[in-house]
Image: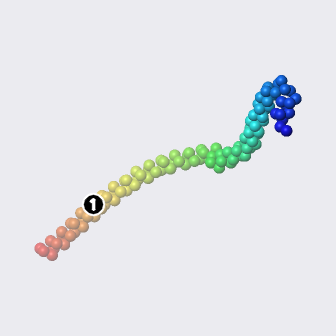
């Protein structure tokens, strides 16, 4: 026999009120059970979040070193670009001089044989 039927038999005049109260209590029980389940999962969730955070964030003293290294590499890479352009410009000038000397030498050899 269910609890609702026992309540309605024992208090015939307040049966409807008791039934409503019982339904409210059952609903509250379901809500509390759901809350207990969600709270029981919290420690695992917090532990997982802490592990993810520890795995993704470097230690604070390492952050400063990484920042300095990044700034140094940016400055060095800008200098390297400038040096590379300067070197390529010199190489291009030497290439033109070499081609001009080769052309002059070839023309001198041609004059020597023809002339």
- Quarter of the image with the C terminus in it: bottom left
Please name the residue shown 78% across and 34% down the image: 26
Please name the residue shown 75% across and 42% down the image: 37
Residue nearest the viewer, comparing 17 with 88: 17
Residue nearest the viewer, comparing 7 with 25: 7
Please name the residue shown 86% across and 30% down the image: 9
The answer to which quarter of the image holds residue 46 is top right
Is residue 21 visible in the rendered image? The answer is no
Q: What residue would you read off at disc 1?
A: 96
46 vs 19, left or right, is: left
Residue lying at the far left of the rendered structure: 115
Residue nearest the viewer, comparing 110 with 37: 37
Measuring from the top left, give residue 21's x and y in whole percent.
79, 28
Residue lying at the far right of the rendered structure: 10
Measuring from the top left, give residue 99's x and y in whole percent.
26, 64
Question: Is 42 located above or below residue 102 in the figure?
Answer: above
Please name the residue shown 79% across and 30% down the image: 19
Residue lying at the far top of the rendered structure: 13
Tally the numbered discs.
1
Q: Residues within 10 Å of mark 1 (few under 14, many from 20)?
A: few
- Quarter of the image with the N terminus in it: top right
Measuring from the top left, give residue 3's x and y in whole percent.
84, 35
114 vs 70, left or right, is: left
Badge 1 element: helix
The answer to which quarter of the image holds residue 111 is bottom left
Measuring from the top left, give residue 44's x and y in whole percent.
73, 46
The answer to which quarter of the image holds residue 8 is top right
Colour style of the rendered protein structure: rainbow
Question: Is 76 located above or below residue 13 in the figure?
Answer: below
Is residue 93 visible in the rendered image? The answer is yes
């Amino acid at each position: 026999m269910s609890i609702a039927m026992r309540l309605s038999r024992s208090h015939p005049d307040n049966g409807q009120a008791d039934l409503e109260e019982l339904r409210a209590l059952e609903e509250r029980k379901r809500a509390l059970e759901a809350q207990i389940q969600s709270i029981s999962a919290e420690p695992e969730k917090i532990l997982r979040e802490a592990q993810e955070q520890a795995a993704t964030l470097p230690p604070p003293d390492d952050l400063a070193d990484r920042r300095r290294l990044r700034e140094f590499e940016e400055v060095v890479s800008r200098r390297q670009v400038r040096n590379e352009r300067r070197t390529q410009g010199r190489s291009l000038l030497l290439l033109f001089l070499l081609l001009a000397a080769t052309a002059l030498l070839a023309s001198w050899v041609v004059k020597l044989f023809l002339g």
